Structure formats: structure tokens, C-alpha cells
Image (spheres, rainbow, N blue to C red):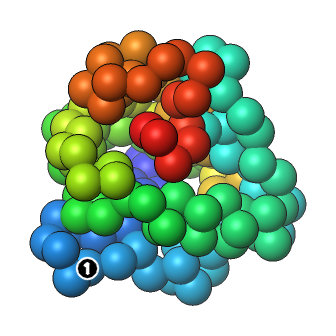
Amino acid sequence: MGQRQEQLIRSFCNAWGDGTASSRPDVEKILAMMAEDAVWQLWVPGGPTIKGRAALRIEIQRQMSYVTHNHCVIRHMVSSDHIVMTEREDYSVSSGVPMPHSMVAVYELNEEGLITAWREYLDTADLARKKGVPMDQVGGPSL
């Protein structure tokens, strides 16, 4: 159960990059794995929610303007026919500062196997400390 769904999420995570300076997120591949009306909550609790492919594209491109070296390492994954959860060790460089962090991501999938909802649970205070910015700047170019 959930093998097809898990493979989709592995491909989705891989599409963000391999951690090298030259790799960049494959925006078209990422968006192709998401439903037209997909929702991404950038962090839980309290993070902004991005809705729809057009807005998702803008958000990914916004992040690409200051984040490089993206790499998602899945440590554990559990799934059902409509839910995939990952425990990950993610790495990126944000405005020149290494930003390794642990997170849990929850993906909801529809009957067509597309991501309809995506929520990331992470410690934004940890990221703010690493970057040396106030918490009110979490999620922007400063972080």
C-alpha cells in the first residue's frame, strides 16, 4: 500500500536539487506533481499558505532568488493511498548561510496521484538562530 505515492514524493523531493551549487529546483517537474488547486503551508504552525499552481510557481521562484544547494534527505516515510509523511533532513544555503534542518512533511494526494496539500512542520526559531535574524523575518530573503 502507498508504494506509488511514496515514489511520487521521492521524485518530488529529488526535484528540489542534489545539494550542489549548480543544481536548481526543477520547477516544471515540481508543479507537474501538484494538483492545479494544490495548497502548500510553508511551515506549521503559523506559516503562510500558498494556493494554486500559479502562486506555487511564484513562491518557488521567490525562494530560488536567495536559496541554493537544496537537498532533501528522507529518513523515514509512511504512507497510505492518500497520505505520505516524511521525516527529512533538508539542506540549503540561504543568502550564503548554510541552513541544515530537520522537518516532517505531510502530503495529501488525490485519486490521480497529484499532491493536493503539503504541510511542513519545522522549527523556524532554529532557522532564525542559524541565520541571525529576528523571528518576524522568517521565510523571507533574510532567512
Q: Within the image, what quadrant is residue 115 found in?
A: bottom right
Residue 129, position as x, y percentages in the image:
31, 18
Residue at left offset 47%, top offset 41%: 142
Q: Quadrant of the C terminus?
A: top left
Name the residue tied to disc 1. Answer: 23
Relative to 9, residue 29 above or below: below
Q: How many marks?
A: 1
Q: Amino acid at mark 1?
A: Ser
5 sits to left or right of 72: right
Residue 57, position as x, y percentages in the image:
68, 71
41 sits to left or right of 105: right
5 sits to left or right of 31: left
Residue at left offset 21%, top offset 82%: 22
Q: Residues within 10 Å of mark 1 (few under 14, many from 20)?
A: some
Of residue 30 and residue 60, the one placed in the foreground of this image is 60
Residue at left offset 29%, top offset 70%: 17
Relative to 32, residue 99 above or below: above
Residue at left offset 53%, top offset 73%: 30
Of residue 50 and residue 73, the one placed in the foreground of this image is 50
Question: Mark 1 falls on what kind of element?
Answer: loop
Residue 42, position as x, y percentages in the image:
60, 38
Is residue 13 visible in this depiction of the protein?
no
Of residue 17 and residue 94, the one placed in the foreground of this image is 94
Is residue 48 visible in this depiction of the protein?
yes
Q: Within the image, what quadrant is residue 99 found in?
A: top left
Residue 8, position as x, y percentages in the image:
44, 65
